[in-house]
Image (spheres, grey):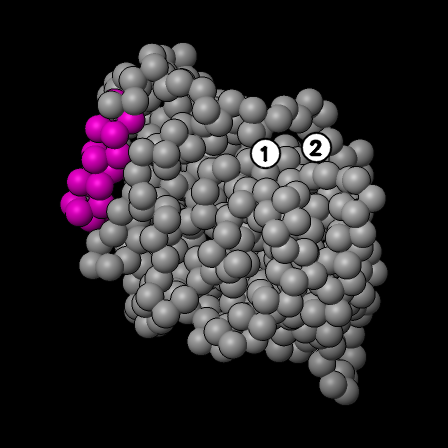
Amino acid sequence: MHQLTLAEIARGLADKKFSSEELTKTLLARIAQLDPQLNSFITLTEDLALEQAKAADARRANGETGALLGAPIAHKDLFCTQGVRTSCGSKMLDNFKAPYDATVVAKLAAAGAVSLGKTNMDEFAMGSANESSYYGAVKNPWNLEHVPGGSSGGSAAAVAARLLPAATGTDTGGSIRQPAALTNLTGLKPTYGRVSRWGMIAYASSLDQGGPLARTAEDCAILLQGMAGFDPQDSTSIDEPVPDFSANLNGSLKGLRIGVPSEFFSEGLDPRIAELVHNSIKELEKLGAVIKTISLPNMQHAIPAYYVIAPAEASSNLSRFDGVRFGHRCEDPKDLTDLYKRSRAEGFGPEVQRRILVGAYALSAGYYDAYYLQAQKIRRLIKNDFMAAFNEVDIILGPTTPNPAWKIGAKNSDPVSAYLEDVYTITANLAGLPGLSMPAGFVDGLPVGVQLLAPYFQEGRLLNVAHQYQLNTDWHTRSPAGF
Protein backbone atom coordinates (compact mmCIF):
# COMPACT_ATOMS: atom_id res chain seq x y z
CA MET A 1 0.00 0.00 0.00
CA HIS A 2 2.92 2.36 0.59
CA GLN A 3 3.51 2.63 -3.18
CA LEU A 4 0.04 4.06 -3.83
CA THR A 5 -0.40 7.69 -4.85
CA LEU A 6 -3.08 9.91 -3.29
CA ALA A 7 -5.29 9.39 -6.35
CA GLU A 8 -4.87 5.62 -6.13
CA ILE A 9 -5.62 5.69 -2.39
CA ALA A 10 -8.83 7.64 -3.05
CA ARG A 11 -9.93 5.03 -5.59
CA GLY A 12 -8.94 2.14 -3.30
CA LEU A 13 -10.88 3.56 -0.36
CA ALA A 14 -13.91 4.23 -2.57
CA ASP A 15 -13.80 0.65 -3.90
CA LYS A 16 -13.37 -0.72 -0.33
CA LYS A 17 -10.11 -2.50 -1.23
CA PHE A 18 -8.76 -1.40 2.14
CA SER A 19 -9.81 0.89 4.99
CA SER A 20 -8.18 4.12 6.10
CA GLU A 21 -7.38 2.45 9.43
CA GLU A 22 -5.55 -0.42 7.69
CA LEU A 23 -3.61 2.00 5.52
CA THR A 24 -2.72 4.24 8.47
CA LYS A 25 -1.44 1.31 10.55
CA THR A 26 0.67 0.12 7.60
CA LEU A 27 2.29 3.53 7.10
CA LEU A 28 2.87 4.13 10.82
CA ALA A 29 4.69 0.79 11.01
CA ARG A 30 6.73 1.74 7.95
CA ILE A 31 7.69 5.09 9.50
CA ALA A 32 8.76 3.36 12.74
CA GLN A 33 10.92 0.96 10.72
CA LEU A 34 12.53 3.32 8.19
CA ASP A 35 12.48 6.88 9.51
CA PRO A 36 15.42 6.41 11.91
CA GLN A 37 17.58 6.38 8.74
CA LEU A 38 16.03 9.61 7.45
CA ASN A 39 15.07 11.71 10.49
CA SER A 40 12.17 13.12 8.47
CA PHE A 41 9.69 13.36 11.39
CA ILE A 42 9.93 15.47 14.54
CA THR A 43 6.67 14.25 16.08
CA LEU A 44 4.52 11.22 15.26
CA THR A 45 0.82 11.45 16.16
CA GLU A 46 -0.19 7.79 16.12
CA ASP A 47 -3.23 8.10 18.40
CA LEU A 48 -4.59 11.12 16.54
CA ALA A 49 -3.98 9.42 13.17
CA LEU A 50 -5.85 6.25 14.15
CA GLU A 51 -8.69 8.30 15.58
CA GLN A 52 -8.95 10.32 12.34
CA ALA A 53 -8.70 7.16 10.22
CA LYS A 54 -11.56 5.47 12.10
CA ALA A 55 -13.65 8.64 11.74
CA ALA A 56 -12.92 8.74 7.99
CA ASP A 57 -13.96 5.11 7.59
CA ALA A 58 -17.20 5.88 9.44
CA ARG A 59 -17.87 8.86 7.16
CA ARG A 60 -17.34 6.69 4.08
CA ALA A 61 -19.63 4.00 5.52
CA ASN A 62 -22.31 6.69 5.80
CA GLY A 63 -22.00 7.45 2.09
CA GLU A 64 -19.63 10.40 2.21
CA THR A 65 -17.00 10.68 -0.52
CA GLY A 66 -13.95 12.84 -1.14
CA ALA A 67 -10.45 12.44 -2.55
CA LEU A 68 -8.84 13.25 0.82
CA LEU A 69 -11.30 11.36 3.02
CA GLY A 70 -9.12 8.82 4.84
CA ALA A 71 -5.90 9.76 3.00
CA PRO A 72 -2.73 9.85 5.16
CA ILE A 73 -0.58 13.01 5.06
CA ALA A 74 1.84 14.87 7.34
CA HIS A 75 2.36 18.55 8.12
CA LYS A 76 5.57 20.54 8.07
CA ASP A 77 6.26 21.41 11.70
CA LEU A 78 5.42 25.09 11.39
CA PHE A 79 1.68 24.55 10.92
CA CYS A 80 0.13 24.96 14.36
CA THR A 81 -1.68 21.78 15.40
CA GLN A 82 -3.86 21.87 18.50
CA GLY A 83 -2.36 19.97 21.42
CA VAL A 84 0.64 18.81 19.37
CA ARG A 85 4.18 20.13 19.60
CA THR A 86 4.78 22.72 16.88
CA SER A 87 8.51 23.35 17.05
CA CYS A 88 9.47 25.05 13.78
CA GLY A 89 12.58 22.88 13.99
CA SER A 90 13.90 25.07 16.81
CA LYS A 91 14.94 24.70 20.43
CA MET A 92 13.06 27.97 20.92
CA LEU A 93 9.72 26.17 20.44
CA ASP A 94 10.68 22.68 21.56
CA ASN A 95 8.17 22.89 24.43
CA PHE A 96 5.39 24.69 22.51
CA LYS A 97 2.07 22.92 22.02
CA ALA A 98 -0.21 24.99 19.82
CA PRO A 99 -3.58 25.88 21.38
CA TYR A 100 -5.32 25.92 17.97
CA ASP A 101 -5.13 24.48 14.45
CA ALA A 102 -3.70 26.46 11.54
CA THR A 103 -6.29 27.04 8.81
CA VAL A 104 -4.49 24.58 6.51
CA VAL A 105 -4.54 21.90 9.24
CA ALA A 106 -8.22 22.55 9.98
CA LYS A 107 -9.24 22.50 6.30
CA LEU A 108 -7.46 19.24 5.56
CA ALA A 109 -8.83 17.64 8.74
CA ALA A 110 -12.34 18.71 7.72
CA ALA A 111 -11.76 17.09 4.32
CA GLY A 112 -10.98 13.86 6.16
CA ALA A 113 -7.19 13.73 5.74
CA VAL A 114 -5.36 11.67 8.36
CA SER A 115 -2.35 13.44 9.89
CA LEU A 116 0.47 11.02 10.75
CA GLY A 117 2.68 13.68 12.35
CA LYS A 118 4.88 16.75 11.97
CA THR A 119 7.88 16.69 9.66
CA ASN A 120 11.40 17.96 10.24
CA MET A 121 12.49 21.27 8.74
CA ASP A 122 15.23 23.88 8.72
CA GLU A 123 14.93 25.99 11.86
CA PHE A 124 12.18 28.58 11.33
CA ALA A 125 12.29 27.59 7.64
CA MET A 126 15.70 29.23 7.21
CA GLY A 127 17.83 27.04 5.01
CA SER A 128 18.16 25.15 1.74
CA ALA A 129 19.37 21.81 3.08
CA ASN A 130 17.38 20.84 6.20
CA GLU A 131 20.62 20.88 8.20
CA SER A 132 19.78 23.75 10.57
CA SER A 133 17.07 21.84 12.48
CA TYR A 134 17.49 21.55 16.26
CA TYR A 135 16.49 17.90 15.79
CA GLY A 136 19.32 17.11 13.38
CA ALA A 137 19.75 16.97 9.63
CA VAL A 138 17.29 15.13 7.40
CA LYS A 139 18.83 12.58 5.01
CA ASN A 140 17.99 12.29 1.33
CA PRO A 141 16.53 8.80 0.67
CA TRP A 142 18.27 8.72 -2.74
CA ASN A 143 21.63 8.93 -0.95
CA LEU A 144 21.74 9.11 2.83
CA GLU A 145 24.98 11.11 2.73
CA HIS A 146 23.27 13.95 0.85
CA VAL A 147 20.81 16.67 1.84
CA PRO A 148 17.13 16.48 0.80
CA GLY A 149 16.88 20.25 0.29
CA GLY A 150 15.05 22.66 2.53
CA SER A 151 13.37 24.02 4.33
CA SER A 152 10.60 21.45 3.69
CA GLY A 153 13.15 18.62 3.58
CA GLY A 154 11.38 16.45 6.15
CA SER A 155 8.15 16.44 4.14
CA ALA A 156 10.09 15.79 0.92
CA ALA A 157 12.20 12.93 2.34
CA ALA A 158 9.16 11.25 3.90
CA VAL A 159 7.15 11.31 0.67
CA ALA A 160 10.13 10.31 -1.50
CA ALA A 161 10.83 7.31 0.78
CA ARG A 162 7.19 6.22 0.46
CA LEU A 163 6.51 6.72 4.16
CA LEU A 164 3.30 8.50 3.11
CA PRO A 165 1.79 9.70 -0.19
CA ALA A 166 1.85 13.49 0.31
CA ALA A 167 2.69 16.22 2.81
CA THR A 168 2.36 19.95 3.31
CA GLY A 169 5.30 22.30 2.96
CA THR A 170 5.96 26.02 2.80
CA ASP A 171 7.88 28.02 0.23
CA THR A 172 9.57 31.32 1.11
CA GLY A 173 12.32 31.25 -1.51
CA GLY A 174 11.91 27.81 -3.04
CA SER A 175 11.42 25.65 0.04
CA ILE A 176 8.81 23.40 -1.59
CA ARG A 177 10.18 23.34 -5.14
CA GLN A 178 13.87 22.90 -4.27
CA PRO A 179 13.45 19.83 -1.98
CA ALA A 180 10.95 18.42 -4.50
CA ALA A 181 13.65 18.65 -7.18
CA LEU A 182 16.32 17.07 -4.97
CA THR A 183 14.12 14.11 -3.96
CA ASN A 184 12.27 13.34 -7.25
CA LEU A 185 8.90 14.80 -6.23
CA THR A 186 6.37 17.23 -7.62
CA GLY A 187 6.09 20.34 -5.45
CA LEU A 188 3.83 23.35 -5.93
CA LYS A 189 4.14 26.85 -4.52
CA PRO A 190 0.74 28.51 -5.07
CA THR A 191 0.14 32.18 -5.82
CA TYR A 192 0.82 34.32 -2.75
CA GLY A 193 -2.50 34.54 -0.87
CA ARG A 194 -4.03 31.40 -2.41
CA VAL A 195 -3.41 29.34 0.77
CA SER A 196 -4.04 30.81 4.22
CA ARG A 197 -1.02 31.68 6.34
CA TRP A 198 -3.04 31.85 9.56
CA GLY A 199 -1.46 29.52 12.09
CA MET A 200 1.61 29.06 9.90
CA ILE A 201 4.56 30.32 11.98
CA ALA A 202 6.07 33.14 9.95
CA TYR A 203 9.56 33.49 8.56
CA ALA A 204 9.08 36.28 5.99
CA SER A 205 5.44 37.31 5.84
CA SER A 206 5.40 38.79 2.33
CA LEU A 207 7.08 35.69 0.85
CA ASP A 208 5.81 32.63 2.80
CA GLN A 209 3.24 30.41 1.11
CA GLY A 210 1.99 26.92 1.97
CA GLY A 211 1.63 24.22 -0.68
CA PRO A 212 1.68 20.48 -1.45
CA LEU A 213 4.52 17.97 -1.93
CA ALA A 214 3.63 14.68 -3.63
CA ARG A 215 4.89 12.27 -6.26
CA THR A 216 2.61 13.44 -9.08
CA ALA A 217 0.93 16.59 -10.35
CA GLU A 218 -2.41 14.79 -9.96
CA ASP A 219 -1.73 14.31 -6.24
CA CYS A 220 -0.62 17.94 -5.83
CA ALA A 221 -3.94 19.00 -7.37
CA ILE A 222 -5.85 16.89 -4.84
CA LEU A 223 -3.93 18.21 -1.83
CA LEU A 224 -4.01 21.84 -3.01
CA GLN A 225 -7.79 21.53 -3.42
CA GLY A 226 -8.04 20.84 0.30
CA MET A 227 -5.61 23.60 1.30
CA ALA A 228 -6.67 26.55 -0.86
CA GLY A 229 -9.33 29.15 -0.20
CA PHE A 230 -10.03 32.57 1.27
CA ASP A 231 -9.52 32.95 5.01
CA PRO A 232 -10.92 36.08 6.72
CA GLN A 233 -8.50 35.48 9.62
CA ASP A 234 -5.52 36.07 7.30
CA SER A 235 -5.11 39.63 6.01
CA THR A 236 -2.88 38.38 3.17
CA SER A 237 -5.43 35.80 1.97
CA ILE A 238 -6.94 36.57 -1.45
CA ASP A 239 -10.73 36.37 -1.89
CA GLU A 240 -10.49 34.54 -5.20
CA PRO A 241 -12.66 31.59 -6.29
CA VAL A 242 -10.90 28.21 -5.96
CA PRO A 243 -11.22 26.26 -9.20
CA ASP A 244 -11.25 22.48 -9.49
CA PHE A 245 -7.51 21.95 -9.85
CA SER A 246 -8.03 18.43 -11.21
CA ALA A 247 -10.54 19.45 -13.89
CA ASN A 248 -8.07 20.38 -16.64
CA LEU A 249 -5.25 17.93 -15.97
CA ASN A 250 -5.96 16.18 -19.27
CA GLY A 251 -6.18 19.35 -21.37
CA SER A 252 -4.12 19.46 -24.56
CA LEU A 253 -0.82 21.37 -24.62
CA LYS A 254 -1.18 22.11 -28.34
CA GLY A 255 -0.25 25.74 -28.95
CA LEU A 256 0.89 26.34 -25.36
CA ARG A 257 3.58 29.05 -25.43
CA ILE A 258 6.50 28.17 -23.16
CA GLY A 259 9.11 30.82 -22.44
CA VAL A 260 12.69 29.78 -21.66
CA PRO A 261 14.69 32.64 -20.06
CA SER A 262 18.24 32.95 -21.38
CA GLU A 263 19.35 34.02 -17.87
CA PHE A 264 18.49 30.54 -16.54
CA PHE A 265 21.40 29.00 -18.45
CA SER A 266 24.30 30.97 -17.02
CA GLU A 267 27.70 29.57 -16.01
CA GLY A 268 26.45 28.60 -12.52
CA LEU A 269 24.21 25.84 -13.92
CA ASP A 270 25.53 22.26 -13.96
CA PRO A 271 25.67 21.41 -17.71
CA ARG A 272 24.19 17.97 -17.03
CA ILE A 273 21.11 19.62 -15.52
CA ALA A 274 20.94 22.00 -18.50
CA GLU A 275 20.82 18.95 -20.78
CA LEU A 276 17.95 17.41 -18.81
CA VAL A 277 16.04 20.70 -18.95
CA HIS A 278 16.45 20.78 -22.74
CA ASN A 279 15.25 17.17 -22.90
CA SER A 280 12.08 18.14 -21.03
CA ILE A 281 11.57 21.03 -23.44
CA LYS A 282 11.75 18.58 -26.38
CA GLU A 283 9.21 16.33 -24.65
CA LEU A 284 6.78 19.23 -24.26
CA GLU A 285 7.35 20.22 -27.89
CA LYS A 286 6.26 16.71 -28.90
CA LEU A 287 3.02 17.38 -27.00
CA GLY A 288 2.35 20.49 -29.09
CA ALA A 289 3.94 23.28 -27.02
CA VAL A 290 5.68 26.18 -28.74
CA ILE A 291 9.05 27.23 -27.28
CA LYS A 292 10.27 30.82 -27.20
CA THR A 293 13.45 32.29 -25.73
CA ILE A 294 12.70 35.20 -23.41
CA SER A 295 14.61 37.43 -21.01
CA LEU A 296 14.24 38.25 -17.31
CA PRO A 297 16.93 40.96 -17.14
CA ASN A 298 16.65 41.72 -13.42
CA MET A 299 17.00 38.12 -12.28
CA GLN A 300 20.68 38.73 -11.48
CA HIS A 301 19.58 41.01 -8.62
CA ALA A 302 17.13 38.50 -7.11
CA ILE A 303 19.42 36.84 -4.54
CA PRO A 304 20.78 40.09 -3.01
CA ALA A 305 17.24 41.54 -2.89
CA TYR A 306 15.80 38.39 -1.32
CA TYR A 307 18.54 38.15 1.30
CA VAL A 308 17.75 41.68 2.43
CA ILE A 309 13.95 41.43 2.42
CA ALA A 310 13.59 37.94 3.96
CA PRO A 311 15.99 38.51 6.91
CA ALA A 312 14.45 41.95 7.52
CA GLU A 313 10.99 40.41 7.86
CA ALA A 314 12.42 37.52 9.90
CA SER A 315 14.08 39.87 12.40
CA SER A 316 10.70 41.53 12.92
CA ASN A 317 8.67 38.28 13.08
CA LEU A 318 11.06 36.54 15.46
CA SER A 319 11.23 39.42 17.93
CA ARG A 320 8.21 37.85 19.70
CA PHE A 321 10.38 34.94 20.86
CA ASP A 322 11.90 36.68 23.87
CA GLY A 323 11.53 34.15 26.69
CA VAL A 324 8.62 36.02 28.27
CA ARG A 325 5.34 34.57 26.97
CA PHE A 326 6.11 31.21 25.36
CA GLY A 327 9.01 29.20 24.01
CA HIS A 328 12.45 28.67 25.50
CA ARG A 329 13.39 30.67 28.61
CA CYS A 330 16.91 30.73 30.06
CA GLU A 331 17.41 29.66 33.67
CA ASP A 332 17.86 32.16 36.49
CA PRO A 333 18.02 35.42 34.52
CA LYS A 334 19.62 38.31 36.41
CA ASP A 335 17.27 40.89 34.94
CA LEU A 336 15.02 41.47 31.92
CA THR A 337 17.91 42.25 29.58
CA ASP A 338 19.68 39.05 30.59
CA LEU A 339 16.43 37.12 30.05
CA TYR A 340 16.12 38.46 26.49
CA LYS A 341 19.76 37.94 25.58
CA ARG A 342 20.27 34.45 26.93
CA SER A 343 16.85 33.10 25.96
CA ARG A 344 17.38 34.15 22.35
CA ALA A 345 21.03 33.10 22.24
CA GLU A 346 20.19 29.66 23.63
CA GLY A 347 16.92 29.20 21.70
CA PHE A 348 18.02 30.20 18.19
CA GLY A 349 20.61 28.31 16.13
CA PRO A 350 23.46 29.93 14.16
CA GLU A 351 21.61 30.32 10.83
CA VAL A 352 18.60 31.97 12.46
CA GLN A 353 20.85 34.28 14.47
CA ARG A 354 22.75 35.19 11.31
CA ARG A 355 19.56 36.16 9.46
CA ILE A 356 18.14 38.10 12.42
CA LEU A 357 21.35 40.14 12.59
CA VAL A 358 21.35 40.80 8.84
CA GLY A 359 17.69 41.82 8.95
CA ALA A 360 18.07 44.09 11.96
CA TYR A 361 21.03 45.77 10.25
CA ALA A 362 19.08 46.30 7.00
CA LEU A 363 16.16 47.86 8.90
CA SER A 364 18.30 50.11 11.11
CA ALA A 365 17.90 53.86 10.80
CA GLY A 366 21.11 54.47 8.91
CA TYR A 367 20.70 51.66 6.39
CA TYR A 368 16.96 51.27 5.73
CA ASP A 369 17.01 53.41 2.57
CA ALA A 370 20.27 51.97 1.30
CA TYR A 371 19.28 48.32 1.66
CA TYR A 372 15.65 47.49 2.44
CA LEU A 373 14.11 50.21 0.27
CA GLN A 374 16.43 49.39 -2.65
CA ALA A 375 15.61 45.69 -2.34
CA GLN A 376 11.89 46.47 -2.56
CA LYS A 377 12.50 48.49 -5.72
CA ILE A 378 14.36 45.55 -7.26
CA ARG A 379 11.46 43.32 -6.25
CA ARG A 380 9.14 45.51 -8.30
CA LEU A 381 11.46 45.38 -11.31
CA ILE A 382 11.50 41.57 -11.11
CA LYS A 383 7.71 41.49 -11.03
CA ASN A 384 7.59 43.83 -14.05
CA ASP A 385 9.93 41.48 -15.94
CA PHE A 386 7.52 38.60 -15.36
CA MET A 387 4.49 40.65 -16.37
CA ALA A 388 6.20 41.59 -19.63
CA ALA A 389 7.19 37.96 -20.24
CA PHE A 390 3.66 36.70 -19.66
CA ASN A 391 2.42 39.03 -22.39
CA GLU A 392 4.43 36.84 -24.78
CA VAL A 393 4.17 33.34 -23.25
CA ASP A 394 1.77 31.24 -21.17
CA ILE A 395 4.30 29.65 -18.82
CA ILE A 396 8.02 29.91 -18.12
CA LEU A 397 10.29 26.87 -17.88
CA GLY A 398 13.79 26.36 -16.51
CA PRO A 399 15.86 24.40 -14.00
CA THR A 400 14.68 24.28 -10.38
CA THR A 401 18.20 24.12 -8.93
CA PRO A 402 21.66 24.78 -10.39
CA ASN A 403 23.08 21.58 -8.88
CA PRO A 404 21.91 18.18 -7.62
CA ALA A 405 21.80 17.51 -3.87
CA TRP A 406 25.13 18.09 -2.13
CA LYS A 407 26.69 16.14 0.72
CA ILE A 408 25.55 16.89 4.26
CA GLY A 409 27.91 19.45 5.76
CA ALA A 410 29.53 20.40 2.43
CA LYS A 411 28.30 24.00 2.52
CA ASN A 412 28.29 24.61 6.29
CA SER A 413 31.42 26.75 6.21
CA ASP A 414 30.11 28.86 3.29
CA PRO A 415 26.46 29.84 3.83
CA VAL A 416 26.45 32.05 0.72
CA SER A 417 27.07 29.03 -1.53
CA ALA A 418 23.91 27.46 -0.06
CA TYR A 419 21.99 30.69 -0.66
CA LEU A 420 22.98 30.53 -4.35
CA GLU A 421 21.13 27.22 -4.69
CA ASP A 422 17.90 29.27 -4.58
CA VAL A 423 18.81 31.39 -7.61
CA TYR A 424 16.05 29.99 -9.86
CA THR A 425 13.28 29.75 -7.27
CA ILE A 426 13.31 33.00 -5.29
CA THR A 427 12.05 35.19 -8.15
CA ALA A 428 8.60 33.54 -7.95
CA ASN A 429 8.38 34.44 -4.24
CA LEU A 430 9.51 38.02 -4.80
CA ALA A 431 6.82 38.40 -7.49
CA GLY A 432 4.18 36.28 -5.68
CA LEU A 433 3.77 33.94 -8.68
CA PRO A 434 2.83 30.24 -8.62
CA GLY A 435 5.64 27.79 -9.38
CA LEU A 436 5.96 24.02 -9.71
CA SER A 437 8.92 21.65 -9.80
CA MET A 438 8.58 18.24 -11.47
CA PRO A 439 11.02 15.30 -11.82
CA ALA A 440 13.10 15.46 -15.00
CA GLY A 441 15.94 12.94 -14.65
CA PHE A 442 19.04 12.07 -12.65
CA VAL A 443 22.65 13.22 -12.34
CA ASP A 444 25.03 10.79 -10.63
CA GLY A 445 22.03 8.89 -9.28
CA LEU A 446 20.54 12.03 -7.72
CA PRO A 447 17.21 13.52 -8.87
CA VAL A 448 16.89 16.73 -10.90
CA GLY A 449 13.80 18.92 -11.27
CA VAL A 450 12.42 21.25 -13.92
CA GLN A 451 10.54 24.36 -12.79
CA LEU A 452 7.39 25.83 -14.34
CA LEU A 453 6.13 29.35 -13.53
CA ALA A 454 2.74 30.82 -14.47
CA PRO A 455 0.74 34.05 -14.10
CA TYR A 456 -1.18 34.70 -10.88
CA PHE A 457 -3.81 32.11 -9.93
CA GLN A 458 -2.87 29.82 -12.84
CA GLU A 459 -1.93 26.83 -10.68
CA GLY A 460 -4.26 24.72 -12.82
CA ARG A 461 -2.17 25.48 -15.89
CA LEU A 462 1.02 24.38 -14.13
CA LEU A 463 -0.64 21.16 -12.97
CA ASN A 464 -1.96 20.49 -16.48
CA VAL A 465 1.50 20.83 -18.05
CA ALA A 466 3.17 18.73 -15.34
CA HIS A 467 0.48 16.02 -15.58
CA GLN A 468 0.79 15.77 -19.36
CA TYR A 469 4.56 15.60 -19.05
CA GLN A 470 4.24 12.84 -16.43
CA LEU A 471 1.88 10.83 -18.66
CA ASN A 472 4.70 10.73 -21.22
CA THR A 473 7.73 10.24 -18.95
CA ASP A 474 8.48 7.92 -16.05
CA TRP A 475 10.94 9.92 -13.93
CA HIS A 476 8.30 10.53 -11.24
CA THR A 477 7.59 6.81 -10.86
CA ARG A 478 11.14 5.93 -9.78
CA SER A 479 11.76 5.28 -6.11
CA PRO A 480 14.98 5.23 -4.07
CA ALA A 481 16.60 1.84 -3.42
CA GLY A 482 15.81 0.44 0.01
CA PHE A 483 12.56 2.38 0.37
Which residue is found at the position 62% from the left and 60% from the top? 23
Percent across and percent down for residue 276 are 22, 41
* Residue 47 falls left or right of residue 359: right
Q: Residue furthest bottom?
A: 332
| Magenta stretch contains residue 317 | no
Which residue is found at the position 73% from the left and 43% from the top? 111
- Quickly name the residue at label 1: 192
Q: Are marks 1 and 2 in contact (CB under 8 Å)?
A: no
- Quickly name the residue at label 2: 229
Which is nearer the eye, 37 or 312?
Answer: 37
Which residue is found at the position 73% from the left and 64% from the top? 50
Q: Secondary structure at mark 1?
A: loop
- What's drawn in magenta, residue-wise? 268-285
The amino acid type found where label 2 is placed reads Gly
* Residue 397 falls left or right of residue 248: left
**How would you classify the magenta stretch by its main secondary structure?**
helix
Other residues around mark 2 within 10 Å, as few (<14) / some (14–19) / many (≥20): many
Q: Is residue 212 visible?
A: no
Percent across and percent down for residue 84 are 75, 66
**Which quarter of the figure has residue 385?**
top left
Which is nearer the eye, 325 or 49?
Answer: 49
- For the C terminus, the image quarter is bottom left
Other residues around mark 1 within 10 Å, as few (<14) / some (14–19) / many (≥20): many
Placement of 336 over or under 424, stated as above or below? below
Placement of 199 over or under 262, stated as above or below? below
Q: Is residue 141 visible?
A: yes
The amino acid type found where label 1 is placed reads Tyr
Placement of 246 over or under 178, stated as above or below? above
Q: Secondary structure at mark 2?
A: loop
| Magenta stretch contains residue 280 | yes
